[in-house]
Amino acid sequence: AKSAGRNNYKFYTADLNVRASEVLAIESQFRGALERNEFVLHYQPQVDMTDGRLLGAEALIRWNHPEQGLIGPLRFIPVAEERGFIVAIGNWVIREACRQLAEWKAAGCILPKLALNLSALQFRDPELLSVIEGQLVAYDLDGACLEIELTESVLMDDVEGTLQAVEALRALGVSLAIDDFGTGYSSLSYLKRFKADTLKIDRSFVRDIPQDLDDSAITRAIIAMAKTLNMQVLAEGVETAQQWRFLADEGCDQVQGYLVSPPLPAERFEAVLRDGA
Ligand code: C2E
Ligand code: CA
Ligand code: CA
Ligand code: CA
């Protein structure tokens, strides 16, 4: 009912954003792309603000298209959600992330934690838990090396079912982050119910700090709230030293953004891991 309406709205805007012909082209190429392994993950460092230490990374998907080159997720994730490919893509992301973590571990490069983005639709898949558990077992990995980034649309969609899935993930040691905090259908009560480990302040609030006084006040309030709730708080999209300074002064714990590093292909990220950057 209500949640279906929300999803329809989301699909509708996705259609407006992507040209119809492009939607068809992407749709017809999806299966083959998965089979030919044309998707890749890039990795963006997440660092501790107090000492610059690498705490983890976020895995961000790209489509290495044979003719068009590297295609960003905003061009195909909405189409995948609309056309029912998103669960297959999400499962690929989980598999590839675990495979890569195991490869790095075997090479002596330890990444403490890798954060994955999963669509709200993935949480409706009854297989989600067994897929994650299966990959952890197959690659002999601890659940603590994975974090799942949830957006508020995930939290709003079938709250009870999602809570159950989230609790089961926690039991495996997987941690949770609330992504894009402050955008979408915010409800502070979800913060309390989902007990996430990390709150990610959306880039839209970070962009104009410290000049924009409203954004600065909002960012300050989000940091203070996260502290009160005993959550780690991470600022996304940090591009300038001024933004870093403001966030450090306000007691923000972690940072992710171009100032530290853009998302990197696996080989380049591995070099960062080796140098302990
Ligand atoms: P997100 O989860 O909010 O990811 C952060 C986005 O901000 C990424 O864009 C990243 O490249 C970009 N970014 C990072 N630092 C900076 C910065 O300092 N400045 C600016 N301007 N941008 C920065 P990207 O990779 O294009 O991903 C866009 C969105 O696509 C993601 O937003 C996420 O919602 C979705 N996405 C990415 N990978 C996956 C995936 O594997 N599965 C699903 N379901 N969604 C994904
Ligand atoms: Ca994310
Ligand atoms: Ca985000
Ligand atoms: Ca976002």
Image (cartoon, rainbow, N blue to C red):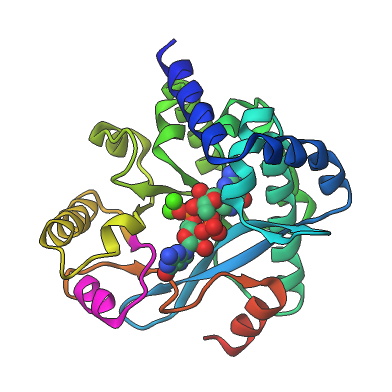
**Relative to 215, is 122 on the left or the right?**
right
Q: Nearer the viewer, residue 181 or 159?
A: 181
The count of marks equals 0
The image position of residue 139, as x and y in percent, is 77, 56
Q: Is residue 202 above or below residue 118?
A: below
Q: Is residue 217 above or below residue 133?
A: below
* Residue furthest to the bottom: 275
The image position of residue 87, as x and y in percent, is 68, 35
* Quadrant assignment for the N terminus: top left
Assess whether residue 239 is covered by the magenta stretch. yes
Q: Residue at x 48, y 35 (%)?
A: 167
**Relative to 132, is 64 on the left or the right?**
right
Q: Residue at x 83, y 39 (%)?
A: 31
Assess whether residue 256 is covered by the magenta stretch. no
- The magenta span reads 234-248
Q: Is residue 263 above or below residue 184?
A: below
Is residue 173 visible from the viewing direction of this image?
Answer: no
